[in-house]
Amino acid sequence: MRATVLHAPRDIRLDTLPDPDLQDDTDAIVRVVAACVCGSDLWPYRGVNKIRKPQQIGHEFIGVVERTGTAVSGVQEGDFVIAPFLFSDNTCAHCEAGVQTSCVNGGGYDGCQAELVRVPWADGTLVAVPGDVDEALLPHLLTLSDVFPTGHHAAVSAGVTAGSTVAVVGDGAVGLSAVLAAKRLGASTVIAMSRHEPRQEVARRFGADHVVETRGKEGAEAVKEILGGIGADAVLECVGTGDSMKQAFRAVRPGGTVGYVGMPHDVELNIPVMFFTNTGLRGGVAPVRAYLDELLPDVLAGDIAPGEVFDLSLPLDRVADGYQAMDERTAIKSYLAV
Amino acid sequence: MRATVLHAPRDIRLDTLPDPDLQDDTDAIVRVVAACVCGSDLWPYRGVNKIRKPQQIGHEFIGVVERTGTAVSGVQEGDFVIAPFLFSDNTCAHCEAGVQTSCVNGGGYDGCQAELVRVPWADGTLVAVPGDVDEALLPHLLTLSDVFPTGHHAAVSAGVTAGSTVAVVGDGAVGLSAVLAAKRLGASTVIAMSRHEPRQEVARRFGADHVVETRGKEGAEAVKEILGGIGADAVLECVGTGDSMKQAFRAVRPGGTVGYVGMPHDVELNIPVMFFTNTGLRGGVAPVRAYLDELLPDVLAGDIAPGEVFDLSLPLDRVADGYQAMDERTAIKSYLAV
């Protein structure tokens, strides 16, 4: 099969590798229909995460089940499936608590920007899409493997409910997804913090009521001005840097919560300030599987169109261009047709 | 009036000071009926917080309104009142959001282990107890000024609801109050972490289902063993040291929340672990005023007896003994009859 392999920083290639095979009777092999590039793929791409040897990459995909192990009963050959970016048995105590990312049998795939993927614990992991799948739905369905549920997780973690005021830090695909998720959960006011015109446009299409272009203290003041002098009930931190976390805590109101889903790099917290202002921090790596039962019907019904985060669509053999465009911020998120 | 003054570390005296007077038309003067010593009073008592000059101390009290400013209409002379440990106008945006501890007009009293206290923003701060007050209720009512709502805040911040599994770190008066609060909110299992027999006894009276005496990794393992192999949904951190916070995060399950109310001293957080396990942190200084409408009726009805945290009752002129007993951990919490 053809599969994307990262050889060295910014050296990414579509190589020919052996097809994956069933290894356990709970496995499935899925033929990928579409994959995409995640902001977190850019950490190793840029060499921030060390690359010791060539490694397959990619963790978001949708596809069609090609083969299943003998113990698999929940999905079968020919099913169109969504694959959460981590696999899980969906039966252990952590899975039952809705934290499939901590599944005792869970883990990551070998790499999904490829033609075939072996999915361990297929029954606990894959979610079949009922009926025929309209091609126009593919980008929206693909977001369900990671980016949209991750934005949703930021909103849920920050306690967004009907009437909440929300500020979103980060205008990447996750931040934009968080805007859509917050609106979907009934937020009364959503403020997108973005200084990039094309991203502002997507944010507005996703329901952002306001866009704040300034950052730092000035940005926080702008948020407060919109919200009657106090900060937001919920701030969704969708970047993961020290600066973005600082920005988030500057923009949250006393008693509010920062929901964070950006993988933290050099983040420091001012605990005394958090204590005296009762500002909380919740979030982490999104338990996508937990959210699919709720989110998939909305996508199938056309109530939400999370696939609008894709502004570049390429065939798999141009995967390197997909990375480069995201690295240079000329694309928000790259869709790869396989 | 007689008032408690901290002169130097462990040098605490009942001095004679001028009576406080009304300063603003929103003030009230309250004659104290009972006050008490807080764990946080021990920080300056022990010299951990610097003492530059003699200072009045104490922030928990109940009493009878003696005089009110011309703008006060919510309480009147003769009312028996509970005073949250911080005053607030109860009308600003933060107060309306239930975070009276961040009131734009809020602050602390001059010192409440005294015969008289000036209460700014009396209407927004004081809560009158309806009807005649039975003397037997005094200790329970006194806990409503701080310690019981603080335990309640830990439980609320950690998201305790019906069926939650809860571990409580800290067996001081706040930790014990947190046990009672968690049970009151419907927790199915409450584990008190305590190695002191008299405190274990109070914890059990307050509804603790289990007591864990061990600490560190061993303590966390004991919690997990009780809870079917995973940690607690909610851990209530009621101490504020680096060790107690570490203990809390060791005992919480993936996806769970640490509710913290111990004023943090040298606390560090392992953010990557929090991120990958989706363990959150919420809490802070308790907005007592927000909780009184909910908690006072339960005390008046005799449904809860939070005053059992007091195991030493002294007249005000023995306040120094009350501090010493708590400092040496021979008393859980000292009640001062004024």
Image: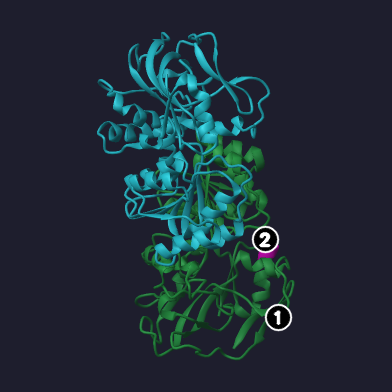
Chain colours: A green, B cyan
Which structural element holds mark 2?
loop
Q: Nearer the viewer, residue A89 or A309?
A: A89
Q: Residue at x 66, y 26 (%)?
A: B51
Q: Which residues are magenta?
A: A325-330
Tell me: residue B122, above or below residue A69. above
Separation of marks 2 and 1 at Cα, in angstroms:
25 Å
Q: Is residue A207 in the magenta section?
A: no
Tell me which numbered mark, 2 or 1, is placed earlier along the sequence.
1
Three-letter amino acid code at the position of disc 1 = Pro
**Where's residue A52, x and y in %?**
73, 77
**Where's residue A210, x and y in %?**
53, 43
Which structural element holds mark 1?
loop
Residue A11 in which image quadrant: bottom right
**Chain to which mark 2 belongs:** A
The residue that disc 2 covers is A329
The answer to whether residue A133 of the structure is visible from this angle is yes
The C terminus of chain B lies in which quarter of the figure?
top left
**Where's residue A24, x and y in %?**
47, 88
The answer to whether residue B107 of the structure is visible from this angle is no
Which is more foreground, mark 2 or mark 1? Answer: 1
The residue that disc 1 covers is A54
**Chain to which mark 1 belongs:** A
**Where's residue B48, x and y in %?**
64, 35
Three-letter amino acid code at the position of disc 2 = Arg
